[in-house]
Structures are given as structure tokens and as C-alpha cells.
Amino acid sequence: MLTSARVATPPGAPGDTLWEALAGLVTSMLECARGAVPGGPVTGDAGDAGDDGDAGDGGVAGVAACGVGCGGPMTPDAQTVSPLNIPGWRDFPLRARLAELTGLPTFVDNDAKALALAEGWCGAAIGCAEYLAMVVSTGVGGGIVLDGKLLDGRLGNAGHIGHLVVEPEGRRCACGGRGCLEAEASGTAIAAITGRPAAEAPAEVVERAGTLVGRAIASVAALLDLELAVVSGSVALGYGEPFFDAARRELKERARISFAAAARIVPGSLDAAGPLVGAGAVGLRGIHRRADLRGVCPETGAAAP
Ligand SMILES: [Zn+2]
């Protein structure tokens, strides 16, 4: 990663206030890219930007795409996003807004799917063709790679492991359901259960969160014949070994069919860079898929063999 920046978004702010904060950040990053590339900005010649109506002129030299990881759910090709944890964005046209702002080919995907791409690209799942990557932080999300390919699902929402039911009579979930993993083991849920920040949870709460995560992984491993579950996020990584030990114990306890019992649970290895590397991977995947559709090589623009 060459550079990064962040901006605080006011909690509960209306959609346009959040967008203005994001737009300011993106604009400053584009300025940074202009400064880093000899020759400065290129206008009217931004690769394949603009030729399918979603990005105009004004691309930046040395910048191939704008890749985005965002909370779900979203509509196909992320035309609109409605992240559960960002109430100000409901059916928000994030991709079109960013394409217009940057002038770049812009691709948006679920943030946990993005992280799954990142872990396979340069993280804990390098060389693995069947794995689940999940995030246990404010919420709980996941992305699945099967037969070497990231699963999208009908509307692009495949992998929402946070809404697997792990306690049938459990707590109400933000999705409207009950007893979802996210309603029991996310940082938000743990804070609500204990009455203090998730980072200060007592040992039995840490163990329970790990156990429930292991329970969900056992079901997914049986369903999809997975080799690996990569778990990251501030809650999981913050709790560390006691959390992972509990998850592995529960996987061993619940996954008895031979192939699922062989699945492994490991911590993510990208730390804070994971989501941003994932967003980059979403951008690369988007460019490659677009090139595939046209039958051209993504690197040279020449007709593919
Ligand atoms: Zn739910």
C-alpha cells in the first residue's frame, strides 16, 4: 500500500453528509496520486473509463480503477448500497457517485467479500481455492471462495455468515431476524450484552463469542467443503487466542463429517490493511471481468487469445 487516509463519519448523519465526508477524502487521495505520478492528471484518456456511461473523462495517470468495499446488503453490481450499520444510506447510489467524482472505472462490492479477495491475494489464504474469510467487528460479515472463485450469489450478497442462526431463541438482529451470529457475537452485540465496550468483555463472553463463530463455521464447512476459515476483525483479533481456541473447540465438536472436520480456523494476516487491500482487489477484479466480457487482455488491451 502506497498511502492511506481516513476520515471520521458522524454517526447517524444523513446520507449526503456522509457522502460529503467520503468525497472529500477521495478527492484528496486523487490529488495525492496526481502528485505521485510524473505528468500529472490525464484527462479524456483514462483507459476504459467512460465508455459504458458510468465514468466520464478526467481519470488520473497511474490510477487504474476505483475499488470499494462497503457494508451490505446491496443491489446487483452494487448499483445501490444499504449497509445495515449506516442507516443514512438506504438505496444509496455509491458506485455512480464515485464514478462521477473520480472519472475512473469504479467497482463496489461487499466489504467482507473484498477482504476474502485480499486474504487470497496476499494474506492467510494464499494458494487456497476453498475458503471462507470472515470479519468479526462492529458487525459480522463473510466472503466465500469456492473452486478458486469468489461467490457472488444472485444479487451479489453471498457470504453473509453474520445472519446464520446460532441461537434459535437468541437476540433480535438488525436484519429483523433472531439469534443471528451478528446479534450474538458482534462487537455491537457484546457491548449490548455486557453493558461495556466489547474490548473489555470478561473471559466467558470472549469464549462464547468464539464458540458461536466456530458453530457457524462448522455449518458452512459442511455445506461447502471448505479447507480454511480466515477470521479477522477487531473483536476476533483483539480477543486473540482464547477466542480462536473456543472457535476451534466448537468446530471440532460440531463438524463430525470427515471433510468438514478437517477445516482449519486461522486469524487473518493483513491487519488494518486488509479492508483497503480488499478494496484494491475489488477494483482489479472489476477490470479483469470487464476485459473478459470484451475478450481483451486487461494489461495491454489487445484481443485475448
Ligand atoms: Zn440477522
Image (tube, rainbow, N blue to C red):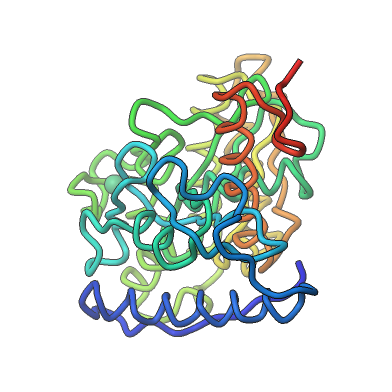
Q: Quadrant of residue 1?
A: bottom right
77 horizontally vs 17: left or right:
right
The residue located at (71%, 22%) in the rendering is 303
Q: Quadrant of residue 166?
A: top left
The correct choice, above or below, for 55 with respect to 290 in the image is: below
The correct choice, above or below, for 138 with respect to 113 in the image is: below
Residue farthest to the left?
176
Residue farthest to the front?
44
104 horizontally vs 31: left or right:
left
Quarter of the picture holding the C terminus: top right
The residue located at (40%, 67%) in the rendering is 190
Q: How many marks?
A: 0
Q: Residue 217: x and y, percent?
A: 54, 36
Q: Residue 285: x and y, percent?
A: 61, 39
The residue located at (39%, 81%) in the rendering is 21
The residue located at (37%, 68%) in the rendering is 188
The correct choice, above or below, for 289 with respect to 166 in the image is: above
Q: Residue 186: x and y, percent?
A: 42, 60
Q: Nearer the viewer, residue 66 or 247?
A: 66
Q: Residue 239: x and y, percent?
A: 62, 66
